[in-house]
């Protein structure tokens, strides 16, 4: 319905709402009530980029999100929005009323990222297409210029919640590069976070992205020094996850422990260097011999039995510094051996998701 034809609802007693201190303009031509806060703003700004607001303020068609008339103020009908928060709506108005230099500043000031993400939520809900594009390009600029680093994210205490919101912006705006930038920061935060919350598992389960799921399940299982460790707490149920999630983690623990059991006696093999004359007789047996000795080193044993990547990394470091390997293998074969180990680590790293799977139906 047109606002001129709005149903006649008596002026309401103002005591049940409060006027927003910043966005209540006497010459505003539309009134929006969010929770208990009334905004009186300029319709043009709400409708020029949002078909949803255009329909909502024109009336006549039912639109989502839902809204309803709630009386009037100073002769202007009040439209009450459902499901939004005052913080979200204020952030939306902040950017709609912002001068160009302010929007430019928001794209370069990393402390404004939470506000930009709040804007992204409500902009998407009401179909502000240009605003969604601005949010995506701002976040892309923050991440690609390395202003929004994993250190900054970790300092917020909620790195994974923020990264999920950025991931969603990338998906909604079809900015694929945001996803790869989020992944880089996600992986660093996984490795640096002292104690991963179970909510990281909930987040990756909302998406079908193995590059996020595999490392997240893996680091949740092995990457913390909590006591008792997560794989023990999985059995007691004292970890705040669903049965399906715990099952996946336990299966991952079982498969990865089995993989290590096989790797600790059979190191990745490697071909002979062009100048090597005693590969089968000396290089391979020497490499294998030191391998099975060094997998018993304290730094390797101290890692969880499913921490295949951590154990392989430790063995690799020990072999790199090993004088016996240096004496027994010519440099070309040594390089081939370490390349083979690096490839094995990379292959496991890239296929982690396959270890954390559901039971067959
Ligand atoms: Zn050799």
Image (cartoon, rainbow, N blue to C red):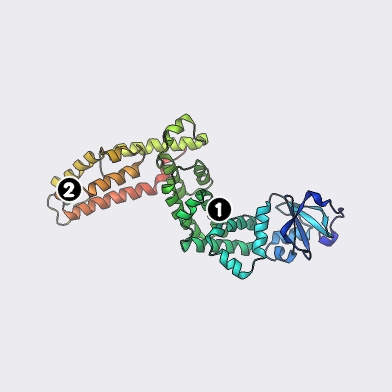
Expressed as whole percent of the image width and height from the top left, the position of residue 269 reads 24, 47
Front-lying residue, 207 or 311: 311
Residue 250 shown left or right of residue 270 in the figure: right
Tag 1 residue:
165
Q: In this view, does 33 lie to the left or right of 185?
A: right
Extreme residue in the top direction: 236
Q: How far apart are marks 2 and 1 (CA)?
A: 50 Å
Name the image quarter holding residue 52.
bottom right
Q: Which of the pair 87/257 is nearer the observer? A: 87
Label 2 close to label 1 by CB (< 8 Å): no
Residue 57 x/y as whole percent = 76, 60
Residue 161 appears in the rendering? yes
Residue picked out by circle 2? 323
Q: Return the residue nearer the eye: 271 or 263.
A: 263
**Hey, which quadrant is residue 259 in on the image?**
top left
Residue drawn at the location 51% of the way across and 52% of the way down? 163
**Residue 251 got which mark?**
none
Mark 2 or mark 1, earlier in chain: 1
Specify few, some or many for label 2: CA neighbours under 10 Å numbering under 14, 14-19, or 20 or more.
Answer: few
User: Which residue is painted at 53% across and 65% down in the image?
Assistant: 108
Q: Position of residue 194 (x, y in %)?
A: 43, 44
Element assignment for label 1: helix
Q: Would you place residue 284 above or below residue 170 in this image?
A: above
Q: Which residue is drawn at 51% across and 51% down?
A: 156
Quadrant holding the N terminus: bottom right
| Mark 1: few/some/many CA within 10 Å (<14, 14-19, 20+) | some
């Amino acid at each position: 319905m047109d606002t001129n034809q709005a149903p006649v609802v008596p002026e309401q007693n103002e005591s049940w709402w409060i006027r927003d201190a910043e966005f209540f303009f006497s010459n505003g031509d539309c009134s929006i009530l969010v929770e208990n806060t009334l905004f009186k703003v300029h319709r043009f700004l709400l409708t020029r980029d949002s078909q949803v607001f255009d329909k909502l303020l024109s009336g006549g068609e039912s639109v989502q999100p839902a809204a309803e008339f709630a009386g009037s103020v100073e002769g202007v009908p009040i439209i009450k929005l459902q499901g939004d928060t005052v913080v979200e709506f204020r952030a939306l108005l902040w950017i709609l009323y912002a001068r160009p230099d302010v929007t430019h500043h928001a794209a370069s000031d990393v402390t404004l990222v939470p506000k930009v993400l709040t804007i992204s939520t409500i902009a998407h809900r009401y179909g502000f297409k240009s605003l969604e594009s601005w949010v995506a390009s701002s976040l892309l600029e923050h991440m690609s210029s390395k202003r929004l680093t994993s250190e900054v994210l970790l300092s917020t205490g909620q790195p994974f919640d923020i990264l999920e919101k950025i991931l969603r912006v990338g998906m909604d705006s079809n900015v694929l590069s945001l996803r790869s930038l989020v992944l880089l920061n996600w992986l660093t935060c996984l490795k640096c976070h002292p104690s991963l919350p179970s909510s990281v598992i909930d987040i990756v389960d909302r998406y079908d992205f193995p590059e996020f799921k595999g490392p997240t399940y893996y680091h949740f299982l092995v990457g913390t020094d909590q006591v008792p460790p997560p794989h023990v707490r999985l059995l007691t149920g004292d970890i705040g996850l669903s049965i399906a999630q715990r099952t996946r983690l336990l299966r991952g623990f079982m498969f990865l422990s089995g993989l290590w059991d096989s790797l600790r006696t059979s190191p990745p093999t490697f071909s002979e260097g062009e100048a090597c004359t005693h590969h089968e007789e000396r290089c391979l047996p020497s490499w294998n011999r030191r391998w099975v000795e060094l997998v018993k080193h304290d730094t390797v044993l101290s890692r969880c039995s499913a921490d295949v990547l951590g154990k392989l990394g430790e063995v690799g470091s020990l072999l790199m510094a090993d004088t016996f390997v240096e004496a027994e293998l010519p440099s070309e074969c040594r390089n081939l051996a370490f390349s083979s180990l690096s490839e094995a680590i990379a292959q496991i790293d890239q296929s982690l998701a396959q270890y954390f799977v559901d039971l067959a139906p």
